[in-house]
Image (cartoon, helix red, strand yellow):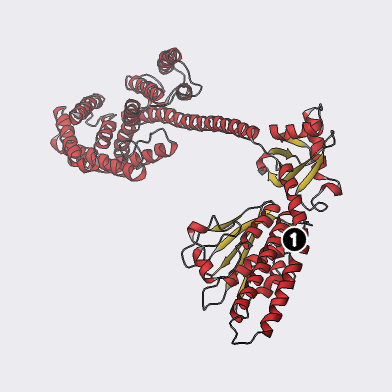
Amino acid sequence: MKGVGFALAYALLTLVGRATAGDGQIVSLVWPASGVAVLWLLAEPPRRAPWVLAPLMAVHAVMVFATGVSPVLAFFGSLSVTVQTAVIGLLVRRWCPTLLGAGGTASLRSPRNLVATGAAAAAGCAIGGLIGPVGLWLDGEPVTYVTAVAWFARHVAGVLTVGAVGHLAWEWRTQPVPARVRGGSSAEFVLLSLGSIAVTIVLFLQPYPLVFLVIALAVWSAARFRTFPASVLCLVLGAVALTLTLAGHGPFARLDDPVAEALVSQLFMVSVMLTGLGVGALGDRIDELFTTATRAREQAALQAELLGEMTESMGEGLVVLGTQGQVERSNGASRRLAHRVSPGAEDADALAELVELLLDPAPENSGAARAELGVGDVVVPLPNGEEIVLAVSRAPLSVRADAGGRTGVLLVLREVTEHRSGLRPLADFASTAAHDLRGPLSAIRSWLSLAVEDVEPASDALMPMRRAERAAEQMADLIDDLLEHALAESGDLAARDVPLGGPDGVLAQVGALLGPDDLLEVLDGAPSVHADPVALRQLFGNLVGNAVKYAKPGQHATIRVRAQQQGARVVVEVEDSGVGVDDADRALIFQRFHRSGAVRAHFRGTGMGLSICQSIVQRHGGTIECVATAPGTGSVFRFDLPAAED
């Protein structure tokens, strides 16, 4: 049924075109049926192209022969239309594969698709313009280059007008077409249409050359209304202009040559149509960009609202400082902390005073003076004589250059008063244990050593005494690890800028833990960090020592250290080639005394080393993790530390 409908439409428009052949003329002046032929071909899949082109050629030949055209001209005319339609369809499908009818659903309203289909129509009609005049020449009619130009013009005008409007109607029927963002009403379109037709008639009936004003009407309609109704109006205006010209009215009718008259009229008609299509396509593109921008603004507003709700619900205080140190933004938690410091003050004043206390604390209120405080901890005195401890971390913020290139600082405030107060007894215990436990244990080890030396090698008491000696050594190792863990959690921290690489770096200092054939490789460009040097040596010493201890049997240890600054932090990765860590143990190895079964069976240790590493990293405001690796490839530990301040 679809093919029958296209065939009837082509036959009807063929009669319309044949009606424009003047007295004594064989060739029609216009050929609107060319647009229907292209739509017919695009409406079918490529594999059915022969089932379109063959009926098209037959319908054309029969209709023009029935209207008085010779068999020779009817054949070449039908061949011309068939070839040009096939070429246009091929080029459209190749140049615009996403176009509706070419394999996709895209609209002709796109500027790119409009230009590409126009070029395809021109190429196909140019080939047809070379074939058709051959029939005239064989029929004994005079043929010049104007004949070929006229043949080309009438067909390309039909494709660009009827074909374009038909394609837009196809889209209108099968797809939702968005309305103009600020378009006109239906009543305005009706009034504009009636007024435009009346103005066009008046312009072609009056004697002055003012027909170019019709272009302004096309621009108005395309700018205010959707492209399809605007293109229909442009087609009507062009048809009115062409009809009046053929009837002898208007400036184009004053030309002596009917062919030139038809050429100019069709050029005018195509100009009106392309103006409407071009303005409509640009208007659609502007509307699309406007809609996208509007949706982006709405999405950004929703995200900003969500972010605001998230920050307001956070337990940590957030304060954004501007380039001059002024408070630009804050959340509810930071304002509540500020009002504990300055009760009754305005939000801005309370926040400003809190920020001043945090950025420039008194020496006795910083981590350097109190053992239980970590790097970044600040003691804030309250008006009632109490004090709170805030863990303060800061990160630089920057705004894109197109927004002014502003930079600032984000302060994250976390109250750790209860946690830090619990660490003070642990620090006291570490000092007591160092004096009270290590002394007696040293005496036990000394007496055991002397006793072993006095026992005969064949004595039955030698083996139990050696076991007691090894147990005492293990107890000493355990006490040492417990003391290191206690100091890592609550010992004094004096942070300063410390280089990681280089001859004076921390990694060079822990090189003594390596065996003669072990390799420690530090990649170039390792940045400095802001940390306690003693804690830092202990951190890397434990990781490097573990890499050496847990090397694969019979192989030397290979350790690679990578460090890269990311904002206000330095991310460090320590990779070794040892036995590795099972996936089931990666989340457990940082617990105190945890050792997997395979490690416990083959390697000596207390299970405290990685817990100490975690405490050191956490006291410097960071996290540490064991990264998943392929089985048998060793282990990778990743952690972050504060970047150097200079």
Q: Which residue is mark 1?
A: 433
- Report which quarter residue 404 is drawn in: top right
Q: On the rendered image, what quadrant is the C terminus found in?
A: bottom right
Which quadrant is home to the N terminus?
A: top left
Residue most toward the front? 460
Q: In the figure, is residue 75 to the left or right of 546? A: left
State the SS at label 1: helix
Answer with left or right where residue 27 lies relative to residue 429. Answer: left
Give 546 or 250, whichever is nearer the viewer: 546
- The picture places residue 127, in percent across and down from the top left corner, at 29, 44
List x then y, in percent, for residue 580: 52, 66
Q: Position of residue 543 (x, y in %)?
A: 63, 65
Q: Is residue 429 above or below residue 318?
A: below
Look at the image and tell me whether residue 119 can be seen.
yes
Graded by Cα atoms within 10 Å as few (under 14), some (14 to 19) or many (20 or more), the crowding at tag 1 reads some
Q: Is residue 236 left or right of residue 568?
A: left
Q: Residue at (69%, 79%) from the top-left corner?
A: 449
Question: Three-letter amino acid code at disc 1?
Answer: Ala
Image position, residue 454 (x, y; %):
68, 85
Tell me if residue 425 comes above or below residue 101 in the rendering: below
- Depth check: 527 or 629 in front? 629
Task: Name the quadrant containing residue 234.
Answer: top left
| Rendered view: 122 above or below 596 | above
In terms of depth relative to the viewer, which is nearer, 361 or 28?
361
Number of residue marks: 1
Quadrant for residue 428, please give it.
bottom right
User: Which sits in the foreground, 14 or 432?
Assistant: 432
Tell me, yes or no, if residue 645 can be seen here.
no
